[in-house]
Structure formats: C-alpha cells, structure tokens
Amino acid sequence: MNTIEIQNLTKTYPNGVKALDNVSLSISNGMFGLLGANGAGKSTLMRTIATLQQPDSGTVTFNDIDTIKKPQLLRAQLGYLPQEFGVYPKVSALKLLDYVAILKGILNKKERRDQIEALLVKTNLYQHRKKSVYTFSGGMKQRFGIAQALLGNPKLIIVDEPTAGLDPEERNRFLNLLSEIGENVIVILSTHIVEDVHALCSRMAILANGTIIKEGKPTDLVNELNGHIWSKTLSKNRLDDILSLPVISTRIVSGNTQVRVKSGSIPGPEFEPVSPTLEDVYFTSSIN
Ligand SMILES: Nc1ncnc2c1ncn2[C@@H]1O[C@H](COP(=O)(O)OP(=O)(O)OP(=O)(O)O)[C@@H](O)[C@H]1O
C-alpha cells in the first residue's frame, strides 16, 4: 500500500496571494479527486506534491520519504501530467517518449522500447508514433501526456485538470484510460469537473481559497445530503420568489428555470424532494 501524508501545507506567493492555507490530507492507493474552482489552489498543491515548488511550511511524506527534503527520491516514483505541457516542435512522439524515459532512468534500450510501445498502444497513439506531438489534437496530446507520465511504472501519478478543453468523445476516452491505471498506485486527479470525479474517484476533497472544505468518499458525501435537496421549476419572471432561499444551483430547462435548494424541511410551495448529486455536494460545500 502506498500512502501520501500531507500535513499543514501553507504557501503564500510573493504577490501576497495565500494559495494554500494549512492543507492536510491523507491519500492511499486508488483514484483521489481534488475538486475546486479556478484559483482554489489545486495546481499549487499538485506542483508542491510533485516537488516542483516548495511550500512555506508543512510536510509531504510519501511512503516514509520526506519529499520536501528528498525530492529526488519522490521523483523516481512519480508520473506527472501538468495542466499545460510544452513539447518541442518537430520531435516525434516516439523520440520524445524515448527522451523522457532516459530522463526517468530507464537506461536499458530494450526495456525502454518495450515500455514505450506498450504505452503507445495503451493510449491509442501507436499509429501516430512518428508524428510530431506538436501537431497532435488536444485529446491526443493529453493521451500522450499520460503515456509519458506512466513511463517507469510510477507509484504516484498526478494529473492536473486533464480533461479541460477536450470534446466529449476525447474526454470519455481519456477517462477510460485513467480508469485502467492500476489499483496499486495513487492517482491524484485535480479538476473542476464534478462528473470526472464522480465517474472515477473512490475518495475526494474539495479545495476552496486554499483550504480543504470537504473530504471523503463521493457516495458518503452525497448520502449526507439525503432529504435536504429540493427542486422547483420557476417561470422566468418568478425569480424573486427564491431570493431569500439557500439556492445551490439554477438551470434553464426548456425556457424555465429549475432551481435546487438545500433545506432541512420543505423550503416553500411547489418544491419537490430530489435525490442529491455530487454537484449538490460541490455547490453546497461553499454555502455551508
Ligand atoms: N506563481 C504565482 N504567483 C502568484 N500568484 C499565483 C501563482 N500561481 C498561482 N497563483 C495564485 O494562487 C491562487 C491559486 O492558484 P492555483 O493555480 O493553484 O489554483 P487552481 O485551483 O489550480 O486554479 P485553476 O483551476 O485556475 O488552474 C490563485 O489566486 C492564483 O492566481
């Protein structure tokens, strides 16, 4: 079993933004979802765990390695897909993977070739292996990103907002790929897309303003809201009726506004109780 213990991480950037404020998390094997709005601090946390930047205070321990003191020991076991990664123009996928594999210390040529071939097949890029990654579509680039992250059989895999900007088909393909990664490693998936966490993750946390505001199993967090979510369809000119209610979300359906409200009892006339969703968990976490 792999474990990562994050304790009291704090980071303030030179411009005064406190991106992480005393963050503590304990993560073990399986897929862990980190949800948060833009600017919540997800990338700062991911980069800190990946040892690409130092916190002001706090510790990150991976399987007994103090990763802040000994980043090179973590890096040997890490696969990282950053939010945006640059690639050299004119270098083929095959060459680039070979280069990354060498950097990761896979020096045996046959071993390198076998791993790269298997990953190109797994990510459905084998037929494109001789093309420049620079010319790949967004979805292909992300699949290539996973291939490079998986080189060297890492025990900790970090993927930072991997499906942003992908069309539905590519997003599905990418999520399927992620779900195939073994159960025996830790995968931390940072995203602001609630459905991605719902589809893949056995545990999750919600980050807001640099602080963890919710943590647990998605199903448990959803069940906590049982009996507390109410819905009603308003016609457009009736929005005033709900201004005083704890509204979770509003959605236009066939020209009418469907509103969801969190309340321990029926919040008003014509409200119907509805089953809670992970989106309700996400939106209510900031109004609690
Ligand atoms: N290098 C930096 N210098 C100054 N401020 C920064 C830096 N990097 C991030 N920030 C700020 O820190 C806060 C957290 O940013 P971070 O990128 O970690 O959030 P995020 O949750 O990943 O957001 P997004 O989903 O938009 O990528 C934001 O207010 C951001 O503007």
Image: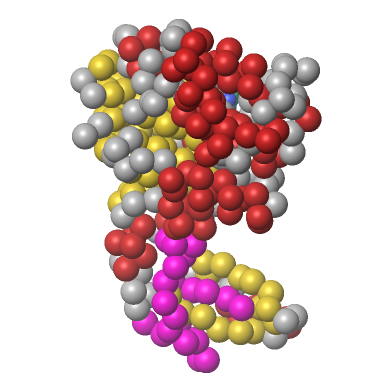
Locate residue 215, reporting x and y percent: 33, 49
Residue furthest out toward the front: 110
Quadrant (top left, top right, bottom left, bottom right) of the C terminus: bottom left
Which corner quadrant of the image does residue 84 belong to? top right
Question: Vertically, is 234 above or below 22?
Answer: below
Q: Residue at x 36, y 21 (%)?
A: 77
Quarter of the rendered image showing ligand 1 = top right
Locate residue 112, reporting x and y percent: 48, 17
Q: Residue at x 70, y 52 (%)?
A: 167
Locate residue 166, reporting x and y percent: 67, 47
Magenta-tinted stretch: 258-283
Q: Residue at x 56, y 37 (%)?
A: 121
Can see residue 177? yes
Locate residue 159, reporting x and y percent: 50, 35
Q: Is residue 133 left or right of residue 107?
A: right
Count of marks overlaid on the render = 0
- Look at the image and name its color scheme: secondary structure
Q: Residue at x 66, y 24 (%)?
A: 93
